[in-house]
Image (tube, rainbow, N blue to C red):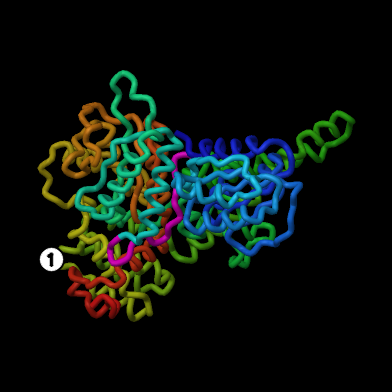
Amino acid sequence: MNLISGIKLYIEKMCTESGPGMKIILLDKETTSIISMAFSQSDMLQREVYLFERIDSGRSNERLKYLKCIVFIRPTKQNIQLLANELRNPKYSAYFIYFSNIIPRTDIKYLAECDESESVREVKELYADYLCVNPNLFSLNIPDCMMNMNWLPDALTHSMQGITAVLLSLKLNPVIRYRAGSQVAQLLAKMIYDQTTKESSLFDFRANVDGAAPPLLLLLDRRDDPVTPLLHQWSYQAMVHELLQIRNNRVDLSERPSVPKEFKELVLSGDQDEFYGNNMYANYGEIGSTIKQLMEEFQRKANDHKKVESIADMKNFIESYPQFKKMSGTVQKHLCVMGELSSISNKRNLFEVSELEQEIACKADHTAQLQRIKKLIADERVSIDDAIKLVALYALRYERHANCDTSALLQIIKSRGGNTQIVPALIEYAGMHVRQGDLFNMVRITDAVKLTRILIKGLKGVENVFTQHTPLLKETLEDVFKGRELDPMYPAINSELVPFRRPPQEVVVFIIGGTTYEEALTVHQLNNAGYKVILGGTTIHNSQSFIGEVLSATSGIQFKHTKSMLKYCSPDNL
């Protein structure tokens, strides 16, 4: 179950089916990102694709009849219309059309009628309607999927199509389970079920051998675990996203004055950068020592290159120079990124802030934590964004505590000019009235399994104060693979596939409201232990994008659960 190799196979197929000769590829906004995350421009050049054009932007009317055209677009109404206009007045010798998802027959018929010059050679569906970030992680790049706590219609359709494409590209026909009580999860589950039923011939994969349980699609709601996206992360990929932001595997450092010109935009792809691929899940400390080793190896090779005395030395130098040059670029790139992470961490006092964030997320100690939060958020060295996150975590954990003092903390935020409406919005979005499951282990525990798990967790002690938190997703997936009863909490929508007592072998998890790189690390660890899990989300959040999602989802609704914070709310929510 490797998403990147799946997308690569589809793109290879497009390039080979169009035959030899110079080609142009016609894309839309989404498919441009899909291709650029799987292949570099030089990879595409090797496949004789010399030009990239967007179907939805202004293009010249020059006819280039010596070029073949590969069209790779999403089957949206707008794209179909733009393609129809192109076929009425074709600029290229032949068209090979690939849609990234299921396309209605009526649209095919309409395109055929527009192709009067008969320049179309091929029309196919290739199920590559998602962005593959890591081999086991995908995103749909939908930054805000809800408004008034309900789906935005376009986001719902796009999510259904994206998940359907993942299932088809992995050849899975799963049991669909969703988080009970979540309207957004139930609605998405129903739409995916309707699509798989309607296109049943496409989902007719071989039956499970030896009575193995069918695969599982698990639709979760971000609102069950609002803590994970708020915490500061210390693994490499997650930390880069939190502090510098990764967009489509690219990091934009153009605003950072200390970065050399050639590193203003960096590509961070585990598939194209071996060092990053091996170390994306390593923590900050490990990365530092790994880069030091890489640096020492590079210096050793650089010294070897200085000793060019004989013809044999020259020959070795020429042969090894490309690797040497590549290694030099890798060392400089990651040193540059680590330098930025280090300077931001020190400037924002993140070690102290992060330690307190983890304490709030993992331990209940109200009085001591309240004093520490008051002291830290009043400190000017702590950025206002970090201060708001500390108050948000406190408000989530102690929402119903007898001495909860969120209002006093918000007063300090207000005096520093911070946006106080974030905290009440977060409680409306993911407070105790919404969450299912036990995020902070505060319920009186009657379940023996859960009690044992918590006791063991307590006995083990903490290896690292900065990484003691584990996402709720880990607990959920452990329940799935241990074959525990999922039913009241995660009902199945296609229950005829359910009477299997064995746990599923393959699981696709989709988080509505966005996933995080910390959850991707959890999935990576499970896959290393021999399980098969793919994780996806409407987007991949860092703390700032998650706060944006919360404000967007709660805009326009009346706040009913934050009466004590009314003076800090937005006027729209009163």
Most foreground residue, 421 or 555: 555
Quadrant position of residue 70: top right
Q: Is residue 265 left or right of residue 507?
A: right
**Residue at 34 percent of width and 41 percent of height:** 198
**Residue at 18 percent of width and 70 percent of height:** 560
- Of the 4 image quadrants, the one containing the N terminus is top left
Q: Is residue 554 left or right of residue 326?
A: left
Q: Which residue is mark 1?
A: 402
Can residue 182 be spotted in the picture?
Answer: yes
Give the x, y percent position of residue 234. 44, 51
Most foreground residue, 186 or 98: 98
The magenta stretch spans residue 139: yes
Give the x, y percent position of residue 272. 60, 42
Q: Which stretch appears magenta?
A: 135-150
Q: For numbered disc 1, what is the local secondary structure?
A: loop
Give the x, y percent position of residue 80. 52, 54
Q: Main secondary structure of the magenta part?
A: loop
- Of the 4 image quadrants, the one containing the C terminus is bottom left
> Dot 1, how many residues are within 10 Å of its Cα: few (below 14), some (14-19), or many (20+)?
few
Amino acid carrying label 1: it is Ala
Give the x, y percent position of residue 197. 32, 39
Quadrant position of residue 292: top right
